[in-house]
Image: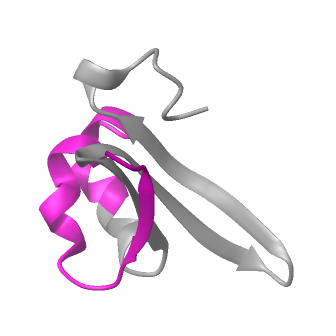
């Protein structure tokens, strides 16, 4: 299997279970999820997710970074 990263534009809440590993409050995730870019890393199946928001001109913030517990410690979130 090859590793791929894609940007998710719609149905971002489909990844909520994994996002909750990085931020345990759903209401906090709701505050940034729709305005941020959601990146999904796959290696056969979803391994990690990352949400990045633009906070100003040239200023970006990682709001959430989470790796499925089965794949933690294998470098996917590094």
Q: Position of residue 21 (x, y in %)?
A: 30, 33
- Residue 9 lies in magenta, yes or no? yes
Q: Position of residue 13 (x, y in %)?
A: 18, 66
- Quarter holding the C terminus is top right
- Compared with residue 64, is residue 47 higher up or lower down, i.e. above or below? above
| Residue ID at (45%, 62%) | 5
Q: Nearer the viewer, residue 21 or 42?
A: 42
Q: How is the image coloured?
A: one colour
- Compared with residue 71, is residue 1 higher up or lower down, i.e. above or below? below
Q: Is residue 50 left or right of residue 57?
A: left
| Residue ID at (33%, 51%) | 42
| Residue ID at (30%, 47%) | 19
Q: Position of residue 28 (x, y in %)?
A: 36, 55
- Quarter holding the N terminus is top left
Q: Nearer the viewer, residue 75 or 8?
A: 75
- Residue 78 lies in magenta, yes or no? no
| Residue ID at (24%, 71%) | 12
What stretch of residues is rendered in magenta? 1-29
Q: Residue furthest top?
A: 73
- Name which quarter of the figure residue 32 lies in: bottom left
Q: Residue furthest front?
A: 1
- Name which quarter of the figure residue 18 lies in: top left
């Amino acid at each position: 299997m090859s590793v791929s990263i894609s940007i998710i534009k719609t149905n971002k809440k489909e990844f909520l279970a994994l996002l909750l590993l990085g931020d345990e409050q759903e209401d906090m995730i709701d505050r940034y999820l729709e305005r941020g870019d959601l990146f999904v890393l796959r290696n056969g199946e979803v391994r990690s997710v990352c949400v990045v928001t633009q906070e100003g001109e040239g200023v970006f913030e990682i709001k959430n970074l989470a790796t499925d517990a089965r794949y933690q410690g294998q470098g996917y979130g590094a």
